[in-house]
């Protein structure tokens, strides 16, 4: 948060607004944890993958269907808006709309995501966060590409900005002409690559917090809009991963543990991944990826919208023009227009420097 100068916005009283809705299209939200309590619109949050029975079977009955059985969505959501009891988000007052489009095993069907985008736009979301995606061959899939782009055009007409992660395969999206990378190749989408700190462990000391996360982040000239913090990997001299520098959040109290990182649809969970901690303790979880970079941008979009100029084109321009230009001069393949700067996009930097 300090790397993107969100703290300067907070110091100026810019904390967001409850009237601004950020839709988190993901695995759900742990709406009752310290950092999200009171920020999630449960009346309009929706489960589009049908996990109500699984929630009752593996956790408890009576929970809202948006309950996060995976943990990814909770981590993402708290970066957009958080009560900051444990970990701060870019904003503290933005309303979160949970739209569950991914299963407890992390599968996010494209058709469900498209449905979720339309639902969020109809629900009045100012910004949609897509910390998900993949790719498929363009050949033979022109119809699917049209469906995705129609959803993006629909959201744009409704006044909804869509922000998506670039992906974690270290691919040059601009050079890959054979495949459609959803959702960064879609119309009107703000595509986010990741920066990640270099250092020796998850807790520092860090050498460079603005390094491009070259070990995983996709990139591409003309595709990447901006970059934001997504965490990084720590390698030993032989190139093996020995640690992570993740983006931390409270662990979802309903997330399930599986025997495999990529469980089959029939694999049952082993139990809760984050059981209730001892008194005085909390369970943290950390994720690394462009999934984590994306909600930093979504939070900035919500903060800009709270200032009264909430149409997508203005928000996008403010995000891009306020970014800190890193890497090669001008818009480049790795950072796009630069690593986001919350204070810069809000026009606060000169004011704060003068006050000092």
Image: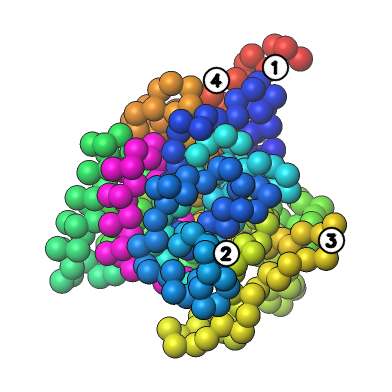
Quote the CA–CA distance across marks 2 and 3.
Answer: 22 Å
Nearest the viewer among 17 and 315 is: 17
- Residue that appears at 61% across and 53% down: 32
**Residue receiving disc 1:** 353
Q: Under tag 2, what secondary structure?
A: loop
147 up-or-down from 155: above or below: below
- Residue that appears at 68% across and 32% down: 7
Q: In the rendering, at what x and y percent does residue 153 appear?
A: 22, 44
Q: Give the quarter of the image for residue 219.
A: bottom left
- Tell whether position 320 is magenta: no
The answer to whether residue 122 is left or right of residue 220 is left
**Residue receiving disc 2:** 71
**Residue receiving disc 4:** 347
**Residue contact at pointers 4 and 1, CB within 8 angstroms:** no
Q: Which range is magenta?
A: 106-133
Q: In the rendering, at what x and y percent does residue 137 appear?
A: 25, 70
Can residue 164 be seen here? The reply is yes
Q: Mark 4 or mark 1: which comes first in sequence?
A: 4
- Residue that appears at 73% across and 48% down: 86
Q: Mark 3 or mark 4: which comes first in sequence?
A: 3
The answer to whether residue 81 is left or right of residue 101 is right
Q: Marks 2 and 3: which is nearer the front?
A: 3
> Which quadrant of the figure contains the N terminus?
top right
Quote the CA–CA distance across marks 4 and 2.
Answer: 34 Å
Residue 279: mark: 3
């Amino acid at each position: 948060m300090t790397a993107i100068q969100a703290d300067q916005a907070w110091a100026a009283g810019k904390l967001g607004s409850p009237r601004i809705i950020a839709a988190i299209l993901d695995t759900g939200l742990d709406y009752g944890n310290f950092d999200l309590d009171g920020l999630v619109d449960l009346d309009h949050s929706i489960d589009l993958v049908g996990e109500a029975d699984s929630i009752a079977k593996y956790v408890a009955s009576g929970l809202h269907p948006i309950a996060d059985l995976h943990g990814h969505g909770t981590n993402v959501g708290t970066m957009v808006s958080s009560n900051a009891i444990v970990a701060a988000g870019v904003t503290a007052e933005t309303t979160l709309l949970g739209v569950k489009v991914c299963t407890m095993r992390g599968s996010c069907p494209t058709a469900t995501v498209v449905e979720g985008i339309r639902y969020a736009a109809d629900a009045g979301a100012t910004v949609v966060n897509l910390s998900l995606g993949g790719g498929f061959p363009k050949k033979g899939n022109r119809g699917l590409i049209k469906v995705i782009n129609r959803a993006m055009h629909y959201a744009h007409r409704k006044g909804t900005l869509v922000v998506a992660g670039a992906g974690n395969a270290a691919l040059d999206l601009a050079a890959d002409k054979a495949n459609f990378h959803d959702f960064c190749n879609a119309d009107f989408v703000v595509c986010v690559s990741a920066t990640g700190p270099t250092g020796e462990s998850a807790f520092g000391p860090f050498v460079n917090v603005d390094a491009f996360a070259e070990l995983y982040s996709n990139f591409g000239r003309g595709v990447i809009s901006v970059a934001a913090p997504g965490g990084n990997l720590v390698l030993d001299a032989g190139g093996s991963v020995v640690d992570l520098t993740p983006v931390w959040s409270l662990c979802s109290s309903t997330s399930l543990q599986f025997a495999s990182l990529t469980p089959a649809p029939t694999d049952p969970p082993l139990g809760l991944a984050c059981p209730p901690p001892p008194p005085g303790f909390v369970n943290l979880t950390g994720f690394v990826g462009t999934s984590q970079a994306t909600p930093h941008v979504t939070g900035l979009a919500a903060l800009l919208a709270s200032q009264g100029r909430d149409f997508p084109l203005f928000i996008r321009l403010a995000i891009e023009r306020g970014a800190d230009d890193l890497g090669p001069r001008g818009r480049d393949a790795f950072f796009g227009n630069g690593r986001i700067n919350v204070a810069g996009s809000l026009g606060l930097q000169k004011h704060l420097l003068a006050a000092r």
